[in-house]
Image (cartoon, rainbow, N blue to C red):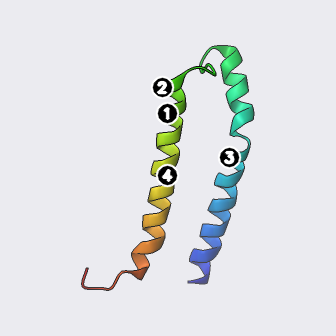
Amino acid sequence: MYSKKLLFTLLSTVFLALFAFGDDCAEVLSHSGSLHPSDFVGVSFWLATAMMLAATVFFFIERDRVKGKW
């Protein structure tokens, strides 16, 4: 159980850093032509993938709290 919490903490820290510095990467990409600041499809895609990642992490964490009959 301790190793699961440690792994979750480490992964959370890595993903937090990715989301924290993602703005810098977006600026670099916008200058190269891959993603423009007014690209609503790209921004909505990024938001959708972030929400799916958050839901996946939530369900993996909560699966241990469900009783065995489910």
Q: Do the residues labelled 1 and 2 touch (CB within 8 Å)?
A: yes
Three-letter amino acid code at the position of disc 2: Val
Three-letter amino acid code at the position of disc 4: Leu
Give the residue pinned by disc 3: 18
Give the residue pinned by disc 1: 44
Gap in angstroms between the C-alphas marked 1 and 2: 5 Å
Gap in angstroms between the C-alphas marked 1 and 4: 14 Å
Location of residue 31 in the rendering, given as x and y in whole percent from the top left corner: 71, 16
Residue at 70% across / 31% down in the picture? 25
Residue 41 numbered tag: 2
Give the residue pinned by disc 4: 53
Which is more N-terminal, label 2 or label 3?
3
Which is more N-terminal, label 4 or label 3?
3
From the image, which quarter does the N terminus lie in?
bottom right
The furthest residue to the left: 69
- For label 2, count other residues whose C-alpha is less than 10 Å away and answer few (under 14), some (14-19) or many (20+): few
- For label 4, count other residues whose C-alpha is less than 10 Å away and answer few (under 14), some (14-19) or many (20+): few
Q: What element carries label 2?
A: helix
Gap in angstroms between the C-alphas marked 3 and 2: 21 Å
Gap in angstroms between the C-alphas marked 3 and 1: 18 Å
From the image, which quarter does the C terminus lie in?
bottom left
Mark 3 or 2, closer to the camera: 2
Q: Is mark 3 on a helix, strand or loop?
A: helix
Three-letter amino acid code at the position of disc 1: Ser
Q: Is mark 4 on a helix, strand or loop?
A: helix
